[in-house]
Image (cartoon, rainbow, N blue to C red):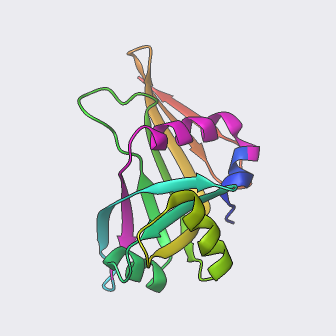
Amino acid sequence: MTVNWAAFTEAEPDLARTAEARFGAFTHHVLATLRKDGSPRTTGLEVRFLDGELWLGMMPNSLKALDLRRDPRFALQANPGEGQSMGGGDVRIAGRAIEVEDPERKAAYSEEVEPPEPFHLFRTELTEVVRTYVEDDKYLVVQVWQPGEPLRTIKRT
């Protein structure tokens, strides 16, 4: 089961706000895709939250775009920032990236974001959102959300 960002936000508004804040704290994040041979590829990427969607924009024929065209599965990790502080914790999102080729949708995105032309545009369908953080300098807390499931919170000492 997959859902878009709006459905995730409706299901878990607090976690969605935290995730957006973590991704909004920095421009570049890390995207993992699968190469032809199935091995992982990690690359830098900018993301946008617009119109209830999490969007991934890419340069034409970039290897990550070609990977997603071949196999839409991805993992996305928010930039942890400098030093030891990960304000807001670590946030990771997994799902499927679906290429958008509709000229009107791409034009609307371009009005908001002003990407270099031409570009690939992918909307995301989420399969998991995970936040990991330290609470009270004592507990490692992991929050895991998957579509159709309640938020799970795991605390470890």
Residue 5's place in the image compared with 90, above or below, is below
Query: In the picture shown, does residue 74 fall above or below 118?
Result: above
Q: Is residue 22 magenta?
A: yes
Q: Is residue 154 left or right of residue 45?
A: right
Q: Which residues are magenta?
A: 10-35
Is 58 on the left-hand or right-hand side of 52?
A: left
- The residue at the far left in this view is 83
Residue 36 appears at what percent x and percent y? 33, 86
- Which of the pair 29/92 is nearer the observer? 29
Residue displayed at 37% across by 64% down: 32
Quarter assignment of residue 123: bottom right
Above or below 139: residue 18:
below
In the rendered view of the protein, which quadrant contains the C terminus?
Answer: top left
Decide which of 58, 33 is in the foreground and name it.
58
Q: Quadrant of residue 37?
A: bottom left
- The residue at 63%/55% (across/down) is 50
Q: Answer whether residue 1 is magenta in the image.
A: no
Question: Residue at the spot x=59%, y=83% of the render?
Answer: 101
Asked if residue 33 is positioned above or below residue 128 in the image, the reply reads below
- Screen quadrant of the N terminus: bottom right
Residue 26: x %, y % from top left: 38, 42
Q: Residue at x 69, y 55 (%)?
A: 52
Query: How many marks can you see?
Result: 0
Please state the horizontal and vertical placement of residue 100, each as a whole percent of the image. Answer: 59, 78
Image coordinates of residue 80 in percent, x first then y, are 34, 39
Horizontally, is 42 left or right of 49 in the view?
Answer: left
